[in-house]
Image (spheres, rainbow, N blue to C red):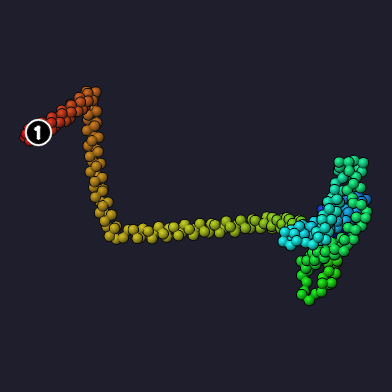
Amino acid sequence: MASVVSVQETVDKLNASLPIFITAAEVENNPEFTKLLFALSRTLTEDGLSRTTHSELTETKDSLLKQKEKYLEAHTVYSELKSLIMEQNISKNENVPSPSTAALYDALSSAISSAEAVHYLSFTPEGSDEITLLGLKQEDLVQNDSHKIKIQQSFQQNIIPELESRLRAKCELLVNFHEPSKDYESEGLSFAKAGQLPAILQKEKSLLQEERKRLGQDRLMRDRQFRQYYQTLLQSLESLEKLITKHRLQSQVRYDKVTTDWLAAKCEAMCLKIRVLQNQLIRDTYTPETVAALKKIRGLLEVAKEEEERELQRAREALQAYESVGMGFEALVREYSALMIEIDNKKWALSELRQSQDGIDSLWSHR
């Protein structure tokens, strides 16, 4: 029992540490292969990657995640600024803004356009600073320092608070979508939840990944149990078949004898039943009146039979007499047959002639 538990633990450990599925029978029958799998499990991860490659992949993913976060932060601010400028341009058609506000948003639009142009200067795949778009430099697109400082102060006083307010409202909207807040929650508490939302989402994502991993392990466990149950069922069926075959051979002779005796008794009973039915049929068919009528019919048939036998005897005697005449008798018979045929033909011709004459007479009588 202890060895069975040890083998099963080995199987579970190998299946959990490597992307394989191995059974207890394979572990028992291939010890050297099992040692090789243990050696591989010390250098490979559960995904089949080497531990060095897995470490490098993890570092690369972390670096990519940081770069992605920086890009998303910049892209969020950029998208919100573009949206702010678009809304301002749309509102110009309804309400004319003040000159300072119009100048502020024009400066913002110009600054964004300059930043976009600076971003597109380097168009080579290597990102070299020596070759730029149209030969322009960054200094050609950036405004002078005094004007830049003045614009930044205007942005700090007007644009940034508006941008923060819009982003804060969207963060609160995301928090309410993730976890609908109650009416009595303060705005500060809702914004604090927005600051914790990335960590909460990351935690939920980790929980989902763990749950998915657990489901995969449960699936492997279910498949292993199914195979074990299937093997056990096959073994049970094989043992049951052996037992049935063994006991059946032992009792087959006695079973055959009993079956034969039963069939013989059944056949005898059927024969007796048929005889009884036959006697009943004869009794129902031949009543006293029927027997008397049959006896009378039998007598008449016997008389007719005797007459026919006497007639047959006379015919035989006549035939013998004719045969004693010789070959001339046969010629006379043929001549007689020919004459009878000729007489019949002439009778038929006369009858046809009479019918024709009668038809002609009837026609003349009608005229």
Q: Does residue 249 appear anywhere in the picture?
A: yes
> Around disc 1, counting alpha carbons within 10 Å, would you say few (fewer than 14), some (14 to 19), or many (20 or more)?
few
Q: Is residue 115 above or below residue 199?
A: above
Q: Amino acid at mark 1?
A: Leu
Position of residue 340 measured from the top left corner of the image (x, y, whole percent):
18, 28
Identify the image quadrant of residue 65: bottom right
Position of residue 325 measured from the top left corner of the image (x, y, whole percent):
22, 26
Dot 1 corresponds to which residue? 363
Furthest-front residue in this view:
99
Q: Does residue 250 appear anywhere in the picture?
A: no
Residue in view at x 32 percent, y 58 percent:
286
Position of residue 109 measured from the top left corner of the image (x, y, whole percent):
82, 54
Identify the image quadrant of residue 341: top left
Residue in view at x 29 percent, y 57 percent:
291
Position of residue 221 measured from the top left corner of the image (x, y, whole percent):
79, 59
Q: Is residue 279 left or right of residue 290?
A: right
Q: Is residue 350 left or right of residue 233?
A: left
Identify the image quadrant of residue 71: bottom right
Which sits in the foreground, 90 or 37?
Answer: 90
Residue in view at x 82 percent, y 58 percent:
103
Q: How many dots with numbers?
A: 1
Which sits in the foreground, 68 or 132?
Answer: 132
In the picture, the quarter occupied by the C terminus is: top left
Q: Is residue 366 above or below residue 228?
A: above
Which sits in the foreground, 320 or 81?
Answer: 81
Mark 1 lies on a secondary structure that is helix
Residue in view at x 24 percent, y 23 percent:
327
In the picture, the quarter occupied by the N terminus is: bottom right
